[in-house]
Amino acid sequence: MNQKMKKKIKHYLHEISASLPAGYPNKKRLLRTLQQNIYDFLEEYPDADWEDVIKHFGASCDIAQSYIEEFSDTELAASYKTHHRHLFLTTVICCSALIALIISIYFFFSWWKNDALIVTETLTVYDGTEMWDEWESEWATEDEDAGAYYEVTK
């Protein structure tokens, strides 16, 4: 089987998938079975072209319609309901995760800004070191509890 035929089969199955309702039960298994049946047909008739496949299996819209008609209205309604329930639940979980991520980023950066960077500076003054007058007055007036202590001896 050539690439062109595989591409047509893929497009054919995609059209059927798009025509079926979103919550259609066993949709993937149904499409895989149909694909395998088409491959088996092409192995049995190697000279068959795309028109022969369409004659044998039918148009994509006709196949989708026949699958839909197999289910009752209550079964289709139940499949829609479960599909919408899954969609709603997925949306709620994703939104909750996004909100939690934004809040955690906010708290991390507020922590980083306030607590993560504490700079302590130590000034060692040896005997004979000359200090400017403005430094001397600044150090002499600072609180002992602030960690800076300077004693002027003359």
Image: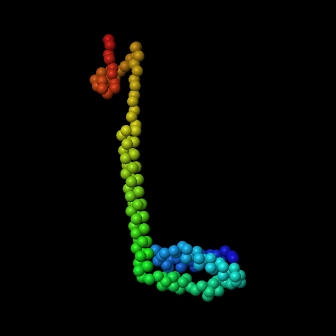
Q: Residue at x 51, y 85 (%)?
A: 66
Choose top left, top right, bottom left or bottom right for residue 87: bottom left
Choose top left, top right, bottom left or bottom right for residue 45: bottom right
Residue 102, horizontal then vertical, whole percent? 39, 53
Q: Pick out the residue farthest to the bottom.
A: 55
Q: Is residue 61 visible?
A: no
Q: Is residue 43 left or right of residue 75?
A: right
Q: Residue at x 50, y 79 (%)?
A: 19
- Front residue of this view, candidates 132 and 21: 21
Q: Is residue 115 left or right of residue 16?
A: left
Residue 68, horizontal then vertical, whole percent? 48, 82
Q: Residue at x 67, y 81 (%)?
A: 42
**Number of marks:** 0
- Quarter of the image for the N terminus: give it: bottom right
Residue 62, horizontal then vertical, whole percent? 53, 86
Q: Is residue 38 visible?
A: yes
Q: Residue at x 66, y 82 (%)?
A: 41
Residue 59, above or below 152: below
Residue 15, horizontal then vertical, whole percent? 54, 78
Residue 4, above or below 92: below
Q: Is residue 101 left or right of residue 36?
A: left
Choose top left, top right, bottom left or bottom right for residue 137: top left
Q: Pick out the residue farthest to the top.
A: 154
- Front residue of this view, candidates 52 and 126: 52
